[in-house]
Amino acid sequence: MSAADDRKLESTAVITALRRGTVPNAGLSRLAVGLEAEEKVLSAQFAFCAAGHADCKFVRGDYGSGKTFLIARAAEIALSQKFVISHVVISPDTPLHKLTALYTKICAGLSTQTEEHALKSIIDTWIYGIEDRLIETGIDENDERLAELTEKEIEASLERVSGLSSGLAAAVRTYYAANNRGDFATAQAAVGWISGDATVANRSFKSQAGIKGSVSETDALLFLKGIVYLIRQAGFAGLFVSFDEAETAQAFPRPQREKGYINLRQLVDMTDKNEIPGCFFLFAGTPAFFESAKGIRSLPPLYDRIGIIADDGFANPMQTQIVLAKFDSEKLEKAAYKVSEIYSEGFGEVDKSRVSPAFIRAMIAKVTGRFGGRVDVVPRLFLREFVDVLDKCALYENYSPQEKYAFTPGNGDMPLKAEEKAVMEVSW
């Protein structure tokens, strides 16, 4: 497949995602508006981590400021710099106060440029690397000694992991041995146990590994350190983990909320002390998460650690927090032009006489007018509506968006989000 074909497929995927009202999985650099400074800073921090350091960043923004988009764009940049990525949405099922839940979600979401659910592949890549190095020394790949020597190399390489968590080391050893003899049920159980799956009931695996129970609150971060170590040993730059909707932590009772913020502080401390080299954490939340009485302000040591200098009109994304401004009409118009370009590459040239700058500005006014003129709450809806207009122009030569387009929020199959409903003006 040619580069042009790849580009067309990416364009099609971007437009398809916008039709659904979701953030595309790829091609985000082609949609980004006004994020050049943030992208540059994040890229530099990833390079810092790839050199053997740890780092973290917080993203603060109201609904409609583009937090989710920036997280997805950061993940895209991390992938391009050969990081393994994982995304966690803080929720009642995956709360900040449960490290085991966070660890399990991270492992379940591990992805590379070519593969999702990549934990097994990462372990395999690491083991294949050991075998390849042995073969390069002159050992034939069919030589019975290869497995024996590989086990010895694994033992030596796992010394660091054993120092972090003997359970993890034992599970990886057992995985290799089971794979070698074709016992794939035990090998699968080993990967499940490593990923934090508490339901693994394979007695043979646990007996062979000499372990009991599962990943616990006390050793979840030790396991995470071990996973990052294996990722780097497998030839990747490191691990990028994004945590979205951190403000969900405010809804929990005080003891759980405080435990969550203590866990968050522990993760920040780990990066400050470089205890997890090659790892980058990105946390995103609303201003209330940072400033309210139920937010991280309630834990002064953490609040002081990630605080920022007052804004003087010049944003500084190099601080611990990236503060996102609300989306405005100018940015939305630029986004529409970018979508038009992407549509042209995926589905054919856009008729700019019908979808003109004047129409785009009028459309923005129509959509935002139903939300009290607020641009920040409409990007998702606007881009979905805009793609619909582009589709109709492509399908029907006699379709005139200037005459036919009307915006009726909530009238289609895609429901409005709570934030959109809250500011929508009612027509009588």
Image (cartoon, grey):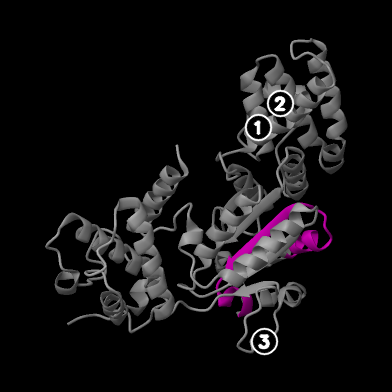
**Is any atom of residue 245 visible in this view?**
yes
In the image, the segment drawn in magenta is 265-291
Q: In the displayed structure, does residue 377 sit left or right of residue 114?
A: left
Q: Residues within 10 Å of mark 2 (few under 14, many from 20)?
A: many
Front one among 79 and 295: 79
Query: The disc labelled 1 sits on which kind of residue?
Result: Val
Q: Position of residue 234 (x, y in %)?
A: 73, 37
Q: Position of residue 310 (x, y in %)?
A: 67, 87
Numbered badge on residue 294: none
Q: In the displayed structure, does residue 332 sit left or right of residue 154?
A: left
**Closer mark to the observer between disc 1 and disc 3:** 3
Numbered badge on residue 310: 3
Inter-mark Cα distance, 2 to 1: 7 Å
Query: The disc labelled 2 sits on which kind of residue?
Result: Tyr
Q: Position of residue 79 (x, y in %)?
A: 61, 50
* Residue holding disc 1: 191
Mark 2 lies on a secondary structure that is: helix
Q: Position of residue 206 (x, y in %)?
A: 72, 26
* Residue holding disc 2: 175
